[in-house]
Image (cartoon, rainbow, N blue to C red):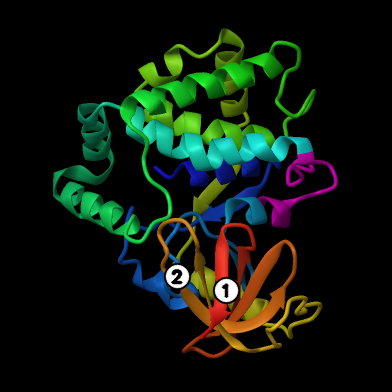
Amino acid sequence: MSPYSEKLRLALGIYHRKWLSFAVPAQPPRPFLRGLIGGYRRIPVLQLGAHFFCDSRLAIIALEEESAALGVVAPEDQSLCRTAEEEIFFAVMAAAPTRRVVRYLLKNVGLMGLPRFLKDRASMMTNATVTLPSRTDARDQIARFGAELGARLKTQAFLSGSKVGLIDLCCYHPLWMGANLDRALVATLPECVSRWMTTVKQFGHGTSSEASESTVMSAIARDNKEDNGLRIDAMPFEPYQSVEVGPSDYGRDISTGQLVKIDSLEIVIRRSLDTGGYVYLHFPCQGFEVSAA
């Protein structure tokens, strides 16, 4: 159900990647995943060997190839991406009628899972720094967002121009979630926006097959190398200092480990496994906090 997972799946489709999918429950507990990455509870997480990317944008950058540079958002487009992922993401949840949300959740988590899911999502908003808008305000936000997208898409195939880019995925995935919750939320968007959504959807998800716990652990073991190229670019932190990292907005669960990199893009911590060896967790600097443990 995760819109951010859909964003990353589409990137894998655009890259024509073959990939392994390890399914987890819609809400914690996820004991195997928690044993690897600690308290961080958002989905998706991308594994590349011993490295786990706990953010969809960092994950897309990590997957980049010369033939498809999705990871870069032009400075003039940063504001639109923030609107999509910080405003419209919550607006579609607030705008959908309760009965349609419940119907969607029943379909995906079942009758027994519904109370647990709702309780979990309520706990995610504990100490959150964001609030859901009213239904009226949410619908107005979606309408304004659709108009802004429409102004661009009248004259070009994608928000990024003639080729699909990261800005397209950032703006698409909250509308994808809105369409799943209540088709009426996107039915009034400009026609060019609807065509663009259809085009983005057609990129698909690449080719996936099911992974197992042993598959995950084997990939870690094969990539358990020294911390080559990792560095600390921010005071007052020191290499291998014990730190806590977590989101600053909602779902503020933390992961702990040794700091091995911090720069303008990402925070990387190293965690020891009970089985020996290490995993490396990558978090974005934007929207996350790091502090001494």
Q: Nearer the viewer, mark 2 or mark 1?
A: 1
Q: Is residue 166 visible?
A: no
Check disc 2 and report the residue beneath it. 213
| Mark count | 2
Q: Which span of residues is magenta-colored?
A: 60-75
Query: In the image, which disc is placed on residue 290?
Result: 1
* Quarter holding residue 199: top right
Q: Residue at x 59, y 26 (%)?
A: 202
Eyeballing the image, is 93 above or below 265? Answer: above
Element marked by disc 1: strand
Q: Is residue 221 left or right of residue 177?
A: right
Tag 2 near tag 1, CB within 8 Å: no
Q: Position of residue 186 (x, y in %)?
A: 45, 19
SS assignment for the magenta stretch, majority: loop
**Residue type, label 1:** Val
Q: Position of residue 208 (x, y in %)?
A: 55, 47
Q: Is residue 71 left or right of residue 280?
A: right
Eyeballing the image, is 284 above or below 11? Answer: below
Eyeballing the image, is 51 above or below 259? Answer: above
**Residue type, label 2:** Glu
Q: Residue at x 75, y 12 (%)?
A: 155
Q: Is residue 44 left or right of residue 266?
A: left
Is 204 or 121 nearer to us in this picture?
Answer: 121
Farthest residue toward the right?
66
Eyeballing the image, is 151 above or below 120? Answer: above
Is 126 or 170 nearer to us in this picture?
Answer: 126
